[in-house]
Every structure is written in structure tokens, then in C-alpha cells.
Image (tube, rainbow, N blue to C red):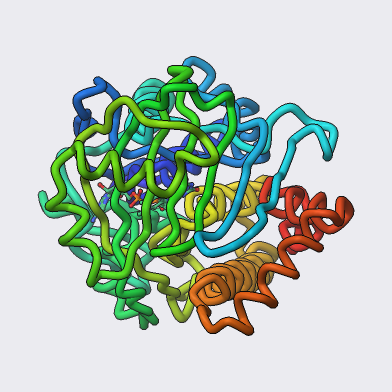
Amino acid sequence: MVEYEVIVSGGGITGLATAIGLCQRDVSTLLITDPLTKPKRGNFGLDLRTLALSTVSTDWLYKLELAKTTPRQRIESMRVWEARGATYIDFNATSVGTNALAWTYEHQSLVAELYTQCTKKLDVRSDSKISKIDKNQRSVTMNNGETITCKLLVIAEGAQSFSRKMLGVPWRRHDLKQRAIVTLARLVEGHKNIAFQRFGDGVCALLPMQDADVVSVIWSVPEKYVQELVNLSDEDFKMRLESQFAVICGEFTAVDRRVNFPLEQSLADQFLLREWIVLLGDSAHTLHPLAGQGVNLGLEDARQLIAILKGGFDSRSIQPTLRHYAARRRVRAQLLQRAMTFFDATWSWCSPTTRWLRNTGTRRFNNCDFLKEQVIREAMGIGPLAKIR
Ligand SMILES: Cc1cc2nc3c(=O)[nH]c(=O)nc-3n(C[C@H](O)[C@H](O)[C@H](O)COP(=O)(O)OP(=O)(O)OC[C@H]3O[C@@H](n4cnc5c(N)ncnc54)[C@H](O)[C@@H]3O)c2cc1C
């Protein structure tokens, strides 16, 4: 029977980074995942799905010698405002002594780079999947009939994880009744390394891409508006974006085709099962993308798991540590979910009183450097809340 110390099932960014991180700690690791898929490239020749990663996440990937050749774009500052508001909030990387708030990547370029590194560094199975997990024998059976044992099984199969469902882990799913419409657009005046986010009819973010005039558009909208936005011609969609953004970032020259994704916030009841099965990344928790924290949270799970495995697999010492790890990670995911719910709800209040309160609060907040710096540190993954272990 084949044996590994760790089996990682799922080759999204979380699973791939975990597998490489473990391998670099000399942990014998097997990665089981689907074959690499092609990016959904649009008319601009770029992946329509993009990702903003915090500097903590990108620094960690660099430390693992990963993603060094993957094209990325620095976000130096960010401007946030609301449709009916009279003011905005500016966040600048320089205010916390750094040159980037975050970095944007094409999603599939990053996945492809990490996947290639995995195939060079460890055993990868992309021809079969786990069909059975023997909780007592600490083994998995693949759908080709092969059985493999391990000391730890890491499930990083994303929100629809088959293994999590098979294990019967309760999944608290909060359907946000929203979808994210995603595309790329070109700005006449370019993005100048600034990200923009507008709260109004949903939350719409423009993230700077490598081309100086291209931004990634991520627009989370209530389901009732989705069809209308999807059916608009490119020209009408461009005009819709202009009506929201032109005052702040000028006009658009073109928009790419649109794809859309359902949004949910979900949480597994347990992140650790039978002391040897760990849920990681979107298999354990999903977040509203309004703050772009989903992968960052998954990579945080990965970093902390790898850190506790460095002492080896002595079952007596590892079990309490794993239990503590799983409990803390669940608290951290809940904290972020509540923060996303709070932001999403706060900006949807639209009575005159709440709008006045919000405007006053926004103006005061924008003038309070200390508070803004704390928020930047949290979003960058270096604030006190982000350091909860
Ligand atoms: C519109 C949108 C924008 C977002 N923007 C950001 C952002 O800017 N920043 C950010 O940090 N997060 C963002 N997120 C969240 C982010 O995309 C997810 O949190 C992230 O992709 C989760 O990564 P993962 O590796 O856990 O899971 P996934 O990316 O879902 O990967 C799971 C992998 O497992 C494989 N798999 C599935 N089932 C099996 C199986 N049975 N056996 C083996 N393999 C399997 C899949 O093929 C896939 O490769 C965004 C999400 C959305 C919807």
C-alpha cells in the first residue's frame, strides 16, 4: 500500500501552495487534483477572473519560491465611496510605510504557475479522485481502486468539496442572493496603480491590471439586477460603468465580455475531523468578495497548518495542536464573515438618517489617519486581528 505523510486533495491556490509548503519542509506529500484548466480569456487576451492578494500572501508565496515569474500589478492606493455619498475614503500604502496595499493577478496564471511547480517538486495525481475515506484506517481509496494511507488528509477542494460532503460535515450556507459580474475594461486616463470601489447598486470594484489602462471589474449585485446587466450590449455596459466611475477615474474606451459567479458565505461546522482530516480554504469557509480576502484567508490557513507540522507527526503532541489550530481558524473565518456582512449591510441602508450618519462617519474616518492605518494593516494581513492564532 502506498503511504504519504500528507495527502492534499484539491489544486486551487490554497491546495497547491499547501502541498509545496509541506514539501519544502520535507513532509512527503501527494497532491490529488483535477487536470489544469484553461483560463477564461476575454477579448483583451487576459483571464477574465482576477485576484487581489495581500502583501503577506505574496511575500509568503515568494518565500516558497512561487509566483516569482507570474505577472502581477501593484495596488498603491485605493479610493472607496458610495453612490449617494458626498465624500470618499482614500487608503495609501505609503501611510503604513510600504509601496503596495495588495497585488493583482490573473487567477489562472497563478494557478498554472503553482501547478507546474507542484509537478516538479512532488507526486501529483490528476487522473483519479478520492472516492472513499476510511476514517479509522487513515486511508483514502481512489476511483481507480487504489488505496493510499496518510497521517494527515488536507481537503482543499473548494466550496463544493466532494470529500467534505462525503464525510457529512455540516455546511452552514448563507446564500447572499447576489452574483458577481466580472469583466475587464480600459480607461482613457489609465488606472495609475489605484483600485476603486463604489458602494451603491451592489459593490463595484476596479482593480489595476498590468497594462496601464486595463482594470478588472468585479461587480457584486443583487440577483434581481443580474440579468439586466448581463443582457446589456458592451456599449451600454460601458456607459453604465461610466455613469458610476467617470467622475472619479475618467471615461472607458472598451469593456470585455462578462462572466458571473454566485455569491455565498458558508462555514463548515468543523475544520478538523477524527484528528487527521483538515478542511482548508473554500472547503472550510467562503467569503463575500467585497474585500478580496478569500484566497488570503485560505493561504493563512495553509501557512499556519504548515507551521504546526514542522515538528513532525508525533501523534500525541500533534493532536492538541491540530485541535487548537482548527478552532482558531474557524474563529478567524467567522470574524471575517461578520466583517463582510457588516460592510455589505451598512452600505445598503438608504433612509435619509442612515445616509447622513454614514456620510458623516465616512468624512470623519477619512480624516482620521490612525484609524485608516489600522484598517489598511488588517486588509494587508498585518494588523492585530489578522494575527489571531
Ligand atoms: C468574483 C470573485 C472574486 C474574488 N476575488 C478575490 C480576491 O480578489 N482575492 C481573494 O483573496 N479572494 C477572492 N475571491 C475568493 C477566491 O476566489 C476563493 O476564496 C479561492 O479561489 C478559494 O481557493 P481554494 O483553493 O480554497 O478553492 P478553489 O479555488 O475552489 O479550488 C479548488 C480546487 O480543487 C479541485 N477539486 C474540486 N473537487 C475535487 C476533488 N473531488 N478532488 C480533487 N480536486 C478537486 C478543483 O478543480 C480546484 O482546482 C473571489 C471570489 C469570487 C467569486
Q: Nearer the viewer, residue 24 or 58?
A: 58
Horizontal relation, residue 389 to residue 251: left or right: right
Seen at 64% across and 66% down, the residue is 325
Horizontal relation, residue 282 to residue 304: left or right: left
Number of labels in the image equals 0
The x and y percentages for residue 344 are: 51, 70
The x and y percentages for residue 235 are: 20, 37
The x and y percentages for residue 255 are: 27, 33
Horizontal relation, residue 154 to residue 144: left or right: right
Q: Is residue 345 above or below residue 230?
A: below
Q: Is residue 182 above or below residue 172?
A: above
Seen at 41% across and 31% down, the residue is 251
Seen at 61% across and 40% down, the residue is 57
Residue 351 appears in view? yes
Q: Quadrant of residue 100?
A: top right
Q: Nearer the viewer, residue 359 or 278?
A: 359
Q: Is residue 112 above or below residue 132?
A: above
- Looking at the rendered image, the quarter that the C terminus falls into is bottom right
The x and y percentages for residue 183 are: 29, 39
Residue 323 appears in view? no
Q: Nearer the viewer, residue 287 or 18?
A: 287
Q: Quadrant of residue 165?
A: bottom left
Q: Nearer the viewer, residue 46 or 313?
A: 46
Seen at 48% across and 15% down, the residue is 69
